[in-house]
Amino acid sequence: MNKLTLLFFVAALSGCTSAGHFSKMDMSRYDSNTSYGIKNTPKGFAVQVDYSRYQFVPDGGSVSSACKSQVITIASEHAKAENRMINPISDSDIRISMGRNLLLGMTSCNAYAEAEWK
């Protein structure tokens, strides 16, 4: 019985993946699903978002869309707080990494984009 239990846990853990990070940043809490980091760059700033939520039925597309939306929202809010404007960030400007934890039912995303000042 112990071998069967061990085999089950090894198989379950092998199905768990996590979203990779693009840059090392200090992260702050944005909301219950989102953490973010901002780092200054020569032409503006970089935004990194960690987004995750529980999904009984995996739907990576909705998590991906929400994650990209958070990048754009956080970048816009940061620019507004700095009293400056940024060039628009398109979906193709956002790098994204997805992951899924089968045991917990969590789908996660890490997204990164660089915003340039106007």
Image: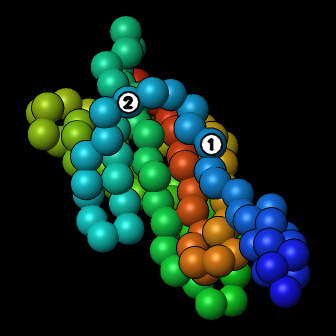
Q: Residue at x 62, y 90 (%)?
A: 56
Look at the image and tell me whether residue 118 can be seen: no
Q: Is residue 31 visible?
A: yes
Label 1 element class: loop
Where does the image place residue 40, in percent across and percent down from the top left?
31, 19
Nearest the viewer among 100 and 118 is: 100
Q: Of the residues shown, which amino acid type is indicated by label 2?
A: Met
Disc 1: CA contacts within 10 A as few (<14), some (14-19) or many (>=20): some
Amino acid type, callout 1: Gly
Mark 2 element type: loop
The x and y percentages for residue 44 are: 35, 21
Tell me which corner region of the image, top left, top right, bottom left or bottom right, holds residue 26. Answer: top left
Determine which residue is flagged by label 2. 25
Distance between the alpha carbons at the discs numbered 1 and 2: 13 Å
| Numbered label attached to residue 87 | none
Residue found at x 26% / y 57%:
30
Specify the farthest residue to the top: 42
Residue tagged 1: 20
